[in-house]
C-alpha cells in the first residue's frame, strides 16, 4: 500500500489519458476527492504563511541592516532584497524537476527545512564581528531558495483545480458519472487537444507585462522603508511599525480588489482591467514625485568636514539653518547628508505618499491577476508547464532587478529621478499593451470555438 501511495503521488495530475492508459479507467472516489482537496488547503495555508513571513521581514530589513552593519547603504539593501528572488529563481526548477520523479512531499519538506535554517541564520547575523551585511545577503538568498517550493505547490494546485474543472464539465453526461469525479474522458474524441498554434507574440507580450507589474511592486516595497525614514525622519522602530500598518492596509485593499475584479472582468474583460490597472499605477507614481519648497530633515550626525558633497556655501548655510540639531545620544534620523539630493530635493508629503500607496494598491493586484489570467487563456487547453515556467522566471527576474534598480537610482539621484523613470517604464508598458491589445485573446476565441 505504501508503494502504491508513492507511485500515485509521483504521477502527474494531468497526464496521458489515451485509450488503454491507466488514467483512462480510474474513477476518483469520494475519499480521494476529500484527500486531494485537503492537500490543496494545506498548500494554500503553506503559501499564506510564507507570504506573511515575507511581509513581516521585508519591512524590517532596512533598519536591521543599518543596525548590524554601519557600512551598509540603501544600494546594498537592493541586493539583499534581490537575493531572495535570485534564490527562488534558482530553486524553483530544481524542486519542480525533483517533484516530477519523486514524491512531492520530499522537495516540500527539504525546502521547508532550508527556510527554517536560513531564517535562524538571519536572526543571528548580528553575532559575527564583521561582514554582517554579507551574512544577511546569504541568509536572504537561502530563504529565497527554500521558497522555491512554490513551483511544486503551484503545479499541484493548478493540476488539481484543472482536473476539477474537467470533471465538473462532464458531470452530467451520465448517471454513473454523477456518482464520482471522472479523471479521464469517455471517448477518444474528448481527449483530443484543439489544434492550432499558440500566438507567440501574445505569449511574449504577456510575459513582458507580468515582468513589469512585478518589477514595479518589488521596487515599491523595497523603497518604502528608506523613503519614509528619509522624508519623515522616522526612527527604525517607527518605520517598521508605520510601514507595516500601511502594507497591511494595502493587503486588505488587495483582497477587496481581487473580489471586485472577478465580477468586473465578466463585464468589460481582462484586457480592459489590465489597461486600467496600469493607468492607476502610473498615477500613483506620478503623485509620488517631489514638489514644493519644503525639504527633508538632514541627519546631523553624519555632517563632518567635507561630508557635504558638491554644494555651494549658501546652500549649505541655508540647510544648516533650517535643520535643528538632534540629540547625539539618539540614533540619527532624517535624510543622510551623503545623499547629495537630500539638500535640494523637496520632500514627499505624507498625504502624497499615502495617496500614492492607495493607488498602487489598487492597480497592482488588478494587473497581477489579469496578466496571469490572460496568459492562461492565451495558452489554451494544451499543456502549460513550460510556458508557466517562463512566466515564473520573468516574475523572479523582476523581483531581482526591481530592488537593485530602485536602490541604486534612489541613492544616487533621489526620488525625483527614480519615480520619473518608473513613470516612463509604465508609459512604455501601456503603449505596448495598446499595440498588441487585439491579439491578447483566449485560444478558443482565436480559433473560432466561442465568440468573444
Image (cartoon, rainbow, N blue to C red):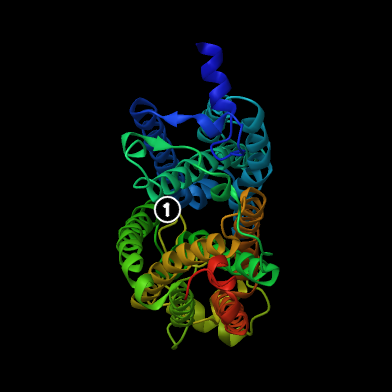
Most extreme residue toward the top, as rendered? 1
Left or right of residue 59: residue 442: right
Residue 420 visible in the shown view: no
Q: Can residue 130 be seen in this view?
A: yes
Residue at (60% x, 84% y) in the render: 431
Counting other residues with Cα less than 10 Å from the Cα at mark 1, is it few (<14), some (14-19), or many (20 or more)? many
Q: Is residue 230 above or below residue 155?
A: below
Residue at 62% x, 80% y: name it.
Answer: 436
* Front residue of 421 and 395: 395
Whether residue 43 sits left or right of residue 197 in the image: it is left
Question: Quadrant location of residue 18?
Answer: top right
* Relative side of 397 to 158, left or right: right
**Where in the figure is residue 80, as x and y percent of width and height?**
61, 49
Percent position (x, y) of residue 95?
A: 63, 35
Please identify the quarter of the rendering in which residue 376 is found. bottom right
Which residue is rendered at x = 60% and y = 68% of the image? 206
Amino acid at each position: 500500500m505504501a508503494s502504491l501511495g508513492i507511485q500515485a503521488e509521483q504521477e502527474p495530475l494531468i497526464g496521458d489519458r489515451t485509450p488503454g492508459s491507466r488514467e483512462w479507467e480510474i474513477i476518483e472516489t469520494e475519499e480521494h476527492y476529500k484527500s486531494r482537496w485537503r492537500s490543496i488547503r494545506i498548500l494554500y495555508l503553506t503559501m499564506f504563511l510564507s507570504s506573511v513571513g515575507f511581509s513581516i521581514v521585508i519591512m524590517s530589513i532596512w533598519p536591521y541592516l543599518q543596525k548590524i552593519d554601519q557600512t551598509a547603504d540603501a544600494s546594498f539593501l537592493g541586493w539583499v532584497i534581490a537575493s531572495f528572488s535570485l534564490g527562488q529563481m534558482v530553486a524553483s526548477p530544481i524542486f519542480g524537476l525533483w517533484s516530477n520523479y519523486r514524491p512531492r512531499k520530499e522537495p516540500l519538506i527539504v525546502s521547508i527545512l532550508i527556510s527554517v535554517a536560513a531564517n535562524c541564520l538571519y536572526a543571528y547575523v548580528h553575532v559575527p564581528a564583521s561582514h554582517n551585511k554579507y551574512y544577511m545577503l546569504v541568509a536572504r538568498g537561502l530563504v529565497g531558495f527554500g521558497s522555491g517550493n512554490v513551483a511544486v505547490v503551484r503545479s499541484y494546485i493548478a493540476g488539481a483545480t484543472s482536473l476539477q474543472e474537467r470533471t465538473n464539465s462532464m458531470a452530467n453526461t451520465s448517471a454513473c458519472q454523477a456518482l464520482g469525479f471522472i479523471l479521464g474522458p469517455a471517448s477518444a474524441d474528448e481527449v483530443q487537444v484543439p489544434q492550432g498554434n499558440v500566438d507567440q507574440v501574445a505569449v511574449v507580450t504577456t510575459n513582458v507585462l507580468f515582468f513589469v507589474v512585478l518589477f514595479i511592486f518589488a521596487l515599491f516595497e523595497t523603497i518604502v522603508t528608506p523613503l519614509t525614514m528619509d522624508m519623515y525622519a522616522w526612527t527604525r522602530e517607527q518605520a517598521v511599525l508605520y510601514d507595516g500598518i500601511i502594507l497591511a492596509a494595502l493587503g486588505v485593499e488587495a483582497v477587496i480588489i481581487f473580489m471586485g475584479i472577478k465580477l468586473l472582468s465578466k463585464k468589460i474583460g481582462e484586457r480592459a482591467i489590465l489597461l486600467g490597472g496600469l493607468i492607476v499605477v502610473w498615477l500613483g507614481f506620478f503623485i509620488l514625485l517631489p514638489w514644493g519648497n519644503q525639504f527633508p530633515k538632514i541627519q546631523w550626525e553624519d555632517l563632518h568636514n567635507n561630508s557635504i558633497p558638491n554644494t555651494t556655501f549658501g546652500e549649505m548655510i541655508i540647510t544648516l539653518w533650517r535643520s535643528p540639531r538632534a540629540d547625539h545620544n539618539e540614533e540619527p534620523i532624517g535624510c543622510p547628508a551623503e545623499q547629495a539630493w537630500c539638500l535640494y530635493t523637496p520632500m514627499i508629503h505624507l498625504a502624497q505618499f499615502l495617496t500614492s500607496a492607495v493607488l498602487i494598491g489598487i492597480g497592482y493586484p488588478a494587473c497581477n491577476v489579469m496578466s496571469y489570467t490572460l496568459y492562461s487563456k492565451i495558452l489554451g487547453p494544451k499543456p502549460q508547464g513550460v510556458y508557466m515556467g517562463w512566466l515564473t522566471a520573468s516574475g523572479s527576474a523582476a523581483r531581482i532587478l526591481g530592488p537593485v534598480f530602485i536602490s541604486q537610482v534612489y541613492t544616487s539621484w533621489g526620488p525625483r529621478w527614480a519615480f520619473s523613470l518608473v513613470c516612463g517604464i509604465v508609459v512604455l508598458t501601456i503603449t505596448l499593451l495598446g499595440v498588441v491589445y487585439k491579439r491578447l485573446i483566449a485560444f478558443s476565441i482565436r480559433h473560432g470555438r466561442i465568440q468573444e
